[in-house]
Image: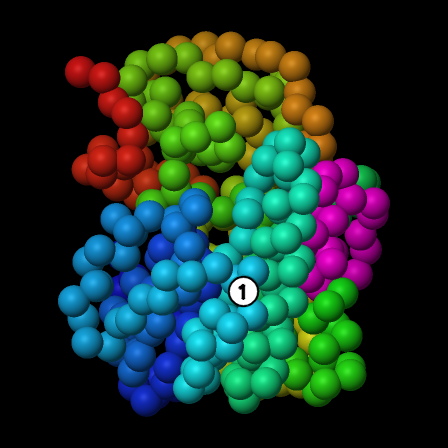
Amino acid sequence: MYTQKYHTQDISQATFLVTGGAGFIGSNIVEYLLTHGAGKVRVLDNFSTGSMENIEPWLARPEFSLIEGDIRDLDTCRRAVDGVDYVLHQAALGSVPRSINDPITSNEVNVSGFLNMLVAARDGGVKRMVYAASSSTYGDHPGLPKVEDKIGNPLSPYAVTKYVNELYAQVFSRVYDFHTIGLRYFNVFGPRQNPRGPYAAVIPLFIQSALNQQAPFINGDGATSRDFTFVENAVQANIKACFAPDIALHEVVNVAVGDVTTLNQLWKYICDITGIDLQPNYREERKGDVRHSLANVSKAQQLMGYQPAVTIQAGLQTTVEWYKQSSYLKVTP
């Protein structure tokens, strides 16, 4: 998938650590790095949400290595960053509902684990750490599109954890001169996103419903809107953040397309791609969900040269075709 190159630097001598590299976004970053000749790519994952299936194609590659471990253990983090030039920190427990049901574990992984990685990367001489932030940080701020310096109150424990990540990263920049870049992801989707389990994201669930010719459930009236972002755009942002020359302090940037799609529109797009015509089932809205989300991506464009390369329609087409060939979806004959 990653024929387009998003860096100009020679990475053949560089070592990259991708935490959560067996997960959805992490494994796509790994694929990009190995496709484009990275010297060494190391993955740290505890497989709580990631899958060996996601990294199986590269297990035998000499430049690839896997550490099965947990970011909640500082010694494991130190071992993982040994000899590493760049850390791409994707490991986290996602999902607003998961954090509402179990805020303690979300905090342990997303806050304590993140702090462990910051300390290990700082002490290990890592050149730059790029980490997955979240659009949930905007909380109840009503402004659209979302601009990085205007946030509201968090609406879920998950949102709290991701905001705390930004605060810790900012402090590490000021106090220890260790500079990191946070990428506020907006509803990333694409190949390898897991539709299984109680906290699956909306797009793989919609695609699974469509391929089974079943009507999906939509929370609320379907007018809830998101800036759905194909995973290749998120990978581009990670790679460009590693090498952006003009970032000398901690920065946070939006990673999105800058386009809005309602849940009703999303289902219509998927129906058109899969050739079905079904009306969705509506149910009550979920607690902690933001009503509307749309990003301004001009800061990422200016600081890193980020340019969203894939629209939602093109991304959905690629994603549907991938799921048709994968074992991820439960498709009934």
Tell me which corner region of the image, top left, top right, bottom left or bottom right, holds residue 291: top right
SS at badge 1: loop
Picture coordinates of residue 207 (x, y %)?
36, 28
Near-viewer residue (71 or 9): 71
Residue that appears at 47% across and 33% down: 200
Residue 130 shows in the view: no
Tell me which corner region of the image, top left, top right, bottom left or bottom right, holds residue 235: bottom left
Picture coordinates of residue 268 (x, y %)?
44, 23
Residue that appears at 46% across and 24% down: 267
Quadrant of the snapshot with the C terminus: top left
Picture coordinates of residue 252 (x, y %)?
67, 66
Picture coordinates of residue 59 (x, y %)?
21, 63
Queried whether the magenta region covers residue 154, the answer comes back as: yes
Label 1 crowd bin: few (<14), some (14–19), many (20+), radius 10 Å: some
User: For this view, does 59 lie left or right of residue 311?
Assistant: left
Residue that appears at 48% across and 13% down: 280
Residue 126 drawn above or below residue 200:
below
Residue 24 drawn above or below residue 270:
below
Residue 105 drawn above or below residue 181:
above
What kind of residue is marked 1?
A: Asp
Residue that appears at 31% across and 79% down: 40
User: For this view, does 327 lie left or right of residue 293?
Assistant: left
Residue 85 shows in the view: yes
User: For this view, does 142 lie left or right of residue 265?
Assistant: right
Residue labelled with disc 1:
73
Region rendered in magenta = 144-166
Near-viewer residue (72 or 323): 72
Near-viewer residue (85 or 310): 85
Tell me which corner region of the image, top left, top right, bottom left or bottom right, holds residue 69: bottom left
